[in-house]
Amino acid sequence: MLEIKHLRKSFGSLVAVDDVSFVVNAGQLVGLLGPNGAGKTTTVSMIAGLLTPDHGEVLVGGQRLAGDTDPAKRRIGLVPQDLALYDELTARDNLRFFGALYNLTGRALDEAIGAAMHLVELSDRIKDRVKTFSGGMKRRLNLAAGLLHDPDILLLDEPTVGVDPQSRNAIFDNLETLKRRGKALLYTTHYMEEAERLADRIVVIDHGKVVADDTVAGLQSRVAPVEDIGGVRANLETVFLTLTGRSLRD
Amino acid sequence: MAFIQVIPLWAMVRKDLQIFFSDRRAVIMSFAVPIAIASFFGSIFSGPSRTTEPAKISIIVVDQDQGTISKSITDGLQHDKNFKVTTTTLEQARDTVRRGRTAAAIVIPTGFGDAAGLALFSRREKPQLDVVFDPSRSTEVAMVRGILTQHVMEAVSKEMFAGPRGRQLVDETLNSVDSMPMPEDRKKLLRDMLGSVQSFYQQNQADPNAGSGGGLTMPYTVREEPMTAGSNIAYNGYAHSFAGMGIQFLLFAMANLGIEVLLERQRGLWKRLRSAPVSRVTLLAGKTLSGTIVALMTLWVSFGFAMIVFGVRIQGSLLGFIGVSVACALMAATFGLLVAALGNTPATARGVTTFAILIMVMLGGAWVPTFIFPAWLQQATLVVPPRWAVDGLDAMTWRGIGLSGAVGPVLALLGFAALFGTIAAARFRWEEA
Ligand SMILES: Nc1ncnc2c1ncn2[C@@H]1O[C@H](COP(=O)(O)OP(=O)(O)OP(=O)(O)O)[C@@H](O)[C@H]1O
Ligand SMILES: [Mg+2]
């Protein structure tokens, strides 16, 4: 469904993403893991068409995106790392605007809004201004805004930052629902337990480079012999630290 | 690629308007503040209406001479409709002028009348009249100087041709002609002339009704007609001030719209906009359109208020007024785009644009009319867009010029809009990291 080939992007002398390749299939959730500044957001931005890669290509259903207005962009839904919402507007007005960007109008738009709000369990707050929402509610609305046009591919950039366990679990349930519906999900996070719970595959990047691309079990088996010496079963956290080192980033 | 998509376009306009009206501060800044400031400026610069007397300039006359002529000058000034005259001592006069309570003090020194009388006919040294003035009120002082000339000439010549003191002075002059340093033939002519003046006196005394009272008078009077829309329409200072303030605040509103784009970018909203299949032209057009609508509302609400409360009327072409307004709003909206394209952070952009707008509207004549500016500056300010907007709106309101008067400003404003739009489109940051 989504194929990334040899993506590369530099900002001045800094190479933020360096030869990154991976695949996300339908009905699959791929976790994109990496420390701060690893190049996760930059990768997601290139996939969504926000940044032009210096090199490499993004294939959606085997096709390259051709320009700003390529209808294939409808197949991608972006859930940005920032809470990209208009605080001054109501939840409904936010979604009406984002839906209209995908040419949704009238009944189709209202239905899409209803479904998305139902999924993230915000239906009763639809007429409230976003500025009255809690952090968790905003995160869920941020997710709903990326789903309106029913994309096949969902790019989720740290969708659970700053939310309580309740909202986080709600979001996980939403993502599992979407996965069952056959969506291809790319999920960016620093939280290992999230990846363990949700991901079918995990791509670890560091300093812009892919350092591992495997299933959760595969990754654990890779590092297990070393870490098992202390009798501790290797979890993803130790795998992650082994792969990316312990030095501080940023 | 370069096409406008209607549904996203209207969604952008709708969203921008919703956000504008949800921000109470923005609404007050765009509607209430310009009305308040324009009302204030309008009341200051409003021309005199036909029914009321013009404001009198207050002056002081210090008569140290106390002679016939000096009293006659004082009397003339006191009866002049332009002045409110008080008389006092020199010290008090200087103090009052220094404190700014009067525009000028006229000091008639001792012996002025006689000396002026003698100087009228001969090349004697001319006596000096002192004018002590407030340097901050030079326009009023210029007026004082002009009117003073008239009264001094009238008083001196009247006395010399008709008064008893004049008669004495003529006699004196006649006696001293021999000792004057001039050729004999000139002396003879002067004697003849003064002799005729003497006969004129004697005639006047024999029959007081025969003469005209004598003396030189201004050989003309002036009828002033303010050149505006029509003979029964007065200059309305409010028309100008509401145009000026409307433009200033619509520019502020548009700069805000540009800064809003920077905020949207900071908040990640442009990631959503850019990830959707919407063309760049649509995004820019949406911003331009919503900006134009907000700018037009700002201007027209302000004018609507002026029409209802201050009786401002569109004396020129209504179509021209609409044309100038729309072109001005478009110019302002593209100016907002320019802010969005060139601005870095919202905070720095706000500082720089506030400064730029204040300079532009000041040079454009939004605060004080450009005709007060020196000639070179009047020419130079043609490069700032508000100048064209102010001139265009003035032309369509109180000047009462027809549609032809709108063509220049509309074309100039559209030119600025094209320029701003082109630069903005070229420099806009499309990459969202
Ligand atoms: N617009 C930009 N200009 C310059 N450098 C940038 C820009 N965007 C990102 N970078 C740099 O590129 C590198 C990768 O950034 P990116 O945001 O992709 O990391 P990330 O993995 O998403 O980090 P985080 O976990 O903190 O979100 C970082 O070093 C960052 O400073
Ligand atoms: Mg990131």
Image (tube, coloured by chain):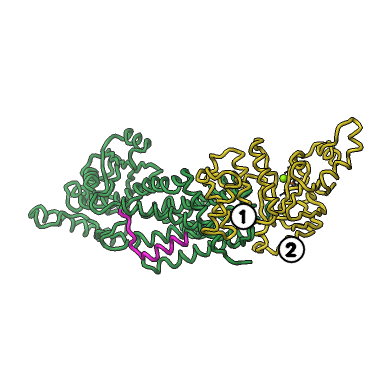
Chain colours: A yellow, B green
Q: Secondary structure at mark 2?
A: strand
Q: Which residue is identified by label 2? A: A64
Distance from mark 1 CB to nearest ligand 1 atom below 8 Å: no
Q: Which residue is identified by label 1? A: B273
Asked whether the residues under marks 2 and 1 belong to the same chain, the reply is no
Distance, label 2 to label 1, CA atoms, is 20 Å
Quadrant hosting residue B186: bottom left
Magenta part of the chain:
B311-328
Q: Percent position (x, y) of residue B372?
A: 42, 53
Instruction: Judge the density around disc 1: few (<14), some (14-19), many (≥20) Cα neighbours within 10 Å.
Output: many
Going by the image, does A169 lie left or right of B222? right
Q: What chain does badge 1 belong to?
A: B
Going by the image, does B352 lie left or right of B31? right
Q: Percent position (x, y) of residue B406?
A: 42, 66
Q: Percent position (x, y) of residue B70?
A: 24, 43
Q: Nearer the viewer, residue B127 or B93?
A: B93
Q: Is residue B317 magenta?
A: yes
